[in-house]
Image (cartoon, rainbow, N blue to C red):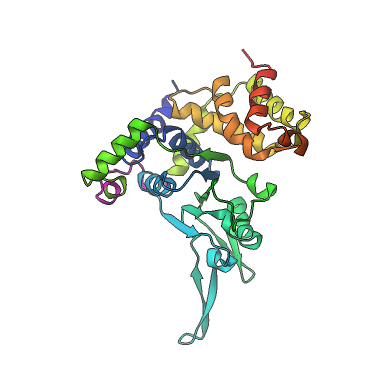
Amino acid sequence: MNEKLAPTLAALAAARREVAKVIIGQEAAVELALLTILTRQHALLEGVPGVAKTLLVRTLAHVLGAESGRVQFTPDLMPADITGTNIFNLQTNQFTLVRGPVFTTFLLADEINRAPAKTQAALLQAMQERCVTIDRETHALDPDFTVFATQNPAESEGTYPLPEAQKDRFMFRIQMSCPARDDEIALARRMLANDAPEAALARGEVQPVLERGQLATLRATLEGITVRDELMAYIVDLVRATRTDESVLVGAGPRATQALLLGGRAKAALEGRDFVTPDDLRQLAPPVLAHRIVLRPEFEIEGLSVHEVLNRLLEQVAVPR
């Protein structure tokens, strides 16, 4: 094991333990959220109300020593409500910048598909360049700025579907399902015992494992994780296969290749290894690729799903030994 990785592996293991004190039965979602942060990317969180999407982001921010903010997207939300605006101060006879909620580290964009395209687009510059332009002046955001955008898959009334170009900005689409029966019983017991997850977080039972600004140091150590050339070729072949399949209208672009490469490296670190395996990439393929693929209408009518296509491609593309 690379000795330089040891502090990173210890910090990641501690972070998972602390998050588990609050987030019950969402191990896969927690892992993908940590991978998103480690790779300095953004993620879509999908799940019905009440599965702890907001709580997950708040807990991660607390554990990783970062600030968090939240925007509730609504049809009347304006771009300035997100980025901020300049207000004229009569006392000083000057304009003063009132910063919007994007000036934070982890931003929860709640129900992002409820806002019209103009407001959704206000996030694009922030997500891509980590800066915003207000009245022709550019303002830098936190270097670790990360967007977790939620969508409610069970409700489509009054929503505006995200365009493909915007969905491509998100590294993962993280599916948060309802907890298993045993986990839901455990949650119910905690509620009766006045030990709800939100209360545990508020009481300070969850301990930070990093201090503010240490995320960059944590990420730098990931460069010591080995990715073999044949695994890079496998990633490229897998992504390219989505563009040539007969059932796919629009396949994944180069950002998907980058996401699989960076995600595989971070996943290896999360599991205590200094090398990436084919299984790392195969496990990450669905959350990386599913939201980037558009099926042809005739195949959708026949009931074919994106996940069925991905499973077929994972079987067809040769796995390096």
Identified at 41% across, 47% down, the residue is 50
Please identify the residue farthest to the front as the structure is shown.
302
x, y (%) of residue 253?
71, 38
Please identify the residue farthest to the left as the structure is shown.
193
Residue 251 visible in the snapshot:
no
For residue 157, which quarter of the picture? bottom right
62 relative position to 108: left or right: left
In this rendering, is residue 146 above or below 218?
below
x, y (%) of residue 111?
53, 54
Determine if the magenta segment contains residue 202: yes
Identified at 32% across, 38% down, the residue is 18
Quadrant where the N terminus is found in the figure: top left
Identified at 48% across, 53% down, the residue is 107
In this rendering, is residue 215 above or below 121?
above
118 relative position to 195: left or right: right
Residue 68 visible in the snapshot:
yes
Q: How many marks?
A: 0
Nearer to me, 267 or 25: 25
Determine if the magenta segment contains residue 101: no
x, y (%) of residue 313?
68, 24
x, y (%) of residue 82?
54, 63
Nearer to me, 97 or 225: 97
- Judged by its main secondary structure, the magenta piece is loop
136 relative position to 108: left or right: right
Please identify the residue farthest to the top as the structure is shown.
321
Task: State which region is magenta.
Answer: 200-213
42 relative position to 293: left or right: left
Nearer to me, 87 or 289: 289
In this rendering, is residue 81 above or below 32?
below
